[in-house]
Amino acid sequence: MIYAAITAALAAGDRIRHVFGTELAATEHSAHDIKLVADQECQKLIFDLLLQMHPDSACIGEEGDIGKPGAPVEWIVDPIDGTMNLAHSIPHFCVSIAARDAATQKILLGVIYDPMRNELFTAERGSGAWLNGAPIRVSKRDTLGDAVVAVGFAKSKESIDHCMKLYQVYGHQAKKLRAMGSAALDLAYVAAGRLDAYIEQGVNLWDIAAGWVLVEEAGGVMETEQKVQGKFRVCAHSGRIDYPLK
Ligand code: IPD
Ligand code: CA
């Protein structure tokens, strides 16, 4: 199955790389968010490829769901994570694809592809985490004062207010704070030991599903809690540092 996820992620990433830096049409503007035609086009491309290779599966995505009800495997897809960055020609975004066992709801594998750096992060449950075929592990740093922490800005007033409190805490206590604009890449970077932690409240399953298995397979910890309207609070880290406010 990971072959299908990789094929689809590379194909969508290729398409995004080709339109990067051009004027991109939006389908929706709202407070703190934008949706692009490219989001829908890439999701269709990904779903078509996944269903061609695994016709018995179902697809859940940021731009809507399709597939067989009762299918044993569900794909969880964010066609472009970091859409705001792409819309502003900031080269930091990715394609995120996970597969979940429908019966147990366990995430089986995750693939995150950064088309601008040609970095492909992959993990299958029980088989480790990889970046372009080389194994990755979470950071070994063990004090908050040495840690680089990414705090994601979600979209609702409640989550932005919470984020401001996190900024107060981690701005002072961590080595450095980052807000990079792609939850999936933040998780991939925690898995690769680049970031020590990623914290956000108000993310969706498709933002974090692939990164979830990457972080765990790289030896890290995913603390998650599902809040109102299915949104998640997440703190992903190496397991070596206690993060006071999440
Ligand atoms: C968003 C990004 C962002 C995070 C938001 C997400 P999108 O996803 O991952 O970093 O802070 O919570 O919704 O809209 O670019 O797919
Ligand atoms: Ca997303």
Image (spheres, rainbow, N blue to C red):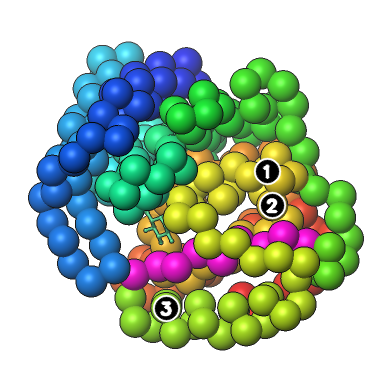
In the drawing, does residue 154 fall left or right of residue 220? left
Residue occupied by mark 1: 191
Q: Residues within 10 Å of mark 1 (few under 14, many from 20)?
A: many
Local SS, label 3 = helix
Residue occupied by mark 3: 160
Alpha carbon distance from label 2 to label 1: 8 Å
Regarding residue 106, the answer to whether it shows in the image is: no
Callout 2–callout 1 Cβ contact below 8 Å:
no
Name the amino acid type tagged 3: Ile
In the image, is the residue at mark 1 within 8 Å of ligand 1 by its beta carbon? no
Residue occupied by mark 2: 195
Name the amino acid type tagged 2: Leu
Residue nearest the observer in this picture, 223 or 154: 154
Name the amino acid type tagged 1: Ala
| Discs 3/1, front | 3
Q: Residues within 10 Å of mark 2 (few under 14, many from 20)?
A: many
